[in-house]
Image: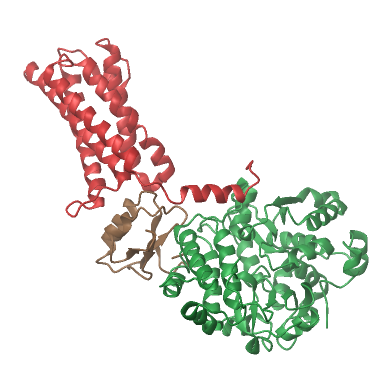
Amino acid sequence: MSDQLLWYTTRGAGAVSLVLLSVVVVLGLLARVRFETRGWPRFLSAAVHRDLALMTLVFLLLHIVTAVVDPFTHLGLVAALVPFGSYYRTVWLGLGTIAFELLIAIVATSLLRQHIGARVWRGIHWLAYLSWPVAVIHGVGTGTDGTAVWMLAIDIVCVAAVAAALVWRLVAAPPDPLADERRVAAERASFGTGR
Amino acid sequence: MSIALLAGPPPAQGMEGFAEHQQRLGSLPPATQLIDAIERSNLRGKGGAGFPVATKWRTVASQRSGTPVVLANGGEGEPLSRKDRVLMEQRPHLVIDGALVAAAAVDADDIVLYVGADHTGAMQAMHRAVIERSAAERARLRLVSAPVRYISGEETAAIHFINDGIALPMSIPPRPFERGVDGRPTLVQNVETLAHVALIARFGDDWYRSLGIGTASGTTLVTVGGAVPQTVLVEIPQGASVADAVNAAGGITSDSDAVLLGGYFGGWVESGAAWGLSLDADPLRQLGYSLGCGVIAVLPSGRCGVVETARILAYLAHESARQCGPCTFGLRAISAAAGRVAGLTPTPGDLEHIQRWAGLLAGRGACHHPDGAAGLLASALRVFAGEFQLHYHDRRCSVVNTAAVAS
Amino acid sequence: MRDRVTLGIDRIKCDGHGVCADLVPELIELDDWGYPIIRGGAIPQSVLPHARRAVSGCPTLALRLQAVASPSRR
């Protein structure tokens, strides 16, 4: 197989993964906002979020496998699985490994959500806020295209979209109407120290 | 009138100590075949739900997921009830005896005595009583002082407090008999129930049944308040009438249109129908009533049923554990609307809203708090139907002359 | 042998997100404050897949499927 093909596939799949992951993060942020129109019911955001996350994994695996088997980079499986385990661009690549493994944890716990309970699931899911920026930084620092114009353009659009969604969520997410109530009631029902 | 729990030294002498207790009643026999005796005695729980005690014990005893725990529930959050704190203040050893034989019957080692922190007389008496017991018994008894709120006597709230320091109800499943204190099967029993058990263990179910009137068995503690000389605790035989209980409390001090049976968790009854009611669980339930935790409050003339109901609803809304949406917001809305109707300043639609929202309360919370409020409200809308209409349509109260009523 | 199942709910976990009412309106509607009113009784077979989706779609995992015989809060 042409080395060039592998190399292009690695870079292309990486870029697509980043775009898909950014859309996934945007949809995740908008879940709290309860975004809804007549043509886009609420459960659709959750469903597309889930499906695109799985698709992201597919492109990610393509990105990683083509990078590992590429004879030119001499990466090997260790680099793919052990953060900072490669000699080639150790730090930047290591970040990619971290982002990937966080994503695996998030997807696995989501698939097993009903067996592990909402609290554990939500705790691990918050790692998405770590996984995505780490993936962006990995993209900028690792590839030879890291700072190519087209790659930077993609990065800027992705970051802008996630930032906008984050602002929207912070501004427009309705507060849990019971949150304050529960706190007041719990204070009244205890002696303040708990046990 | 026969008396069992409150037999012995008069209230003025305060707590009956261990020596006097043993001398008067004899020592506590072992709990052999006690569950059968309890079953034959038809003893029902005195915490409000009236669940058959023997059935509860058998269920706990049959659990295989750990050594059971006995929780003696003296939380008494119902504001109109005094029985648990007075019983613990004057006969703490009856309660402790009952807890000990219950523990033996269900193979429990540990006993938690759950008492309201504000009920200082009861706390002190229970504390002294525990000290008076043998070292072996003391090692198994744990006295826990809990916040006194309406909801803190609920079974799962008591367990929650003991486990995590917060006296708020928890969702079921799992039920207390499956997983409770420290994750173990827990027998939660009201302190009055345990006191009855202590007597049945000594004197048998034949004796216990003979205390009741007709087919009813045993006695029961009732707090009688409202239009009586003062709020008192009386012990009456099961099967006695509401009128008997009120007379034992000194009789009524004014005319009365209605009686609140069962406290805030119970319901209003027209006094004409109330006086003759037999205080026996099954007949009462067939009529749709319940003595609950043993409260009879007689509405005095000069007090408006609509106003009193609004006051109770405001209290119940305030005391909600605020963990479930339907209860937190539903009760609050109903209470606000009822307050406006009581205060003769209704908003158009208030009465219809009250009726609609009341239908959305029962069964939609984690505990029975909203169900109790819905039941109380339904009884008020029935018993005081005319008065509600007068308040709502004519902005007039036939009982109280001024508009500033719901304070 | 088909087990008859019904929708059970943990009212404390429920935060009123309302996703369930979107996914299985045959069984769930929302009250004035956005909390679910659940139709009791056995779930018809035709609605069961939607009920399962509602159970897995609940953001706080407050819904569950349970056997009809067990008494529970609505």
**Residue shown at 89% from the left, 64% from the top:** B21
Tell whether A103 sits left or right of B80: left
Q: Which residue is drawn at 21% across and 36% down?
A: A23
In the image, farthest residue toward the left: A2
Q: Give the farthest residue toward the front.
A: B402
Where is residue B301? Give x, y as percent.
Answer: 68, 81
The residue most toward the top is A87
> Is B278 above or below relative to A81?
below
Q: Residue at x 84, y 49 (%)?
A: B135
- Image quarter in which the C terminus of chain B is found: bottom right
Chain given the colour brown: C
Q: Is residue B262 left or right of residue B352?
A: right
In this rendered view, identify the residue nearer to me: A62 or B130: B130
Rendering colour (chain B): green
Q: In which quarter of the image is the N terminus of chain B?
A: bottom right
Looking at the image, how many numbered discs can be counted on the residues?
Answer: 0
List x then y, in percent, for residue A68.
20, 20
As rendered, which of A161 and A69 lies closer to the eye?
A161
State whether residue A100 appears in this view. no
Question: Along the horizontal axis of the image, is B301 left or right of B65?
Answer: right
* Image position of B237 (left or right of C34): right
How far across and how far down the image is residue B275, in percent?
69, 87
Please say which color scheme the image uses: by chain
Residue nearest the viewer, comparing B387 with C19: B387
Evaluate whether residue B320 shows in this view: yes
Please give the letter of the chain rendered in red: A
Q: Position of residue A31 (x, y in %)?
A: 30, 44
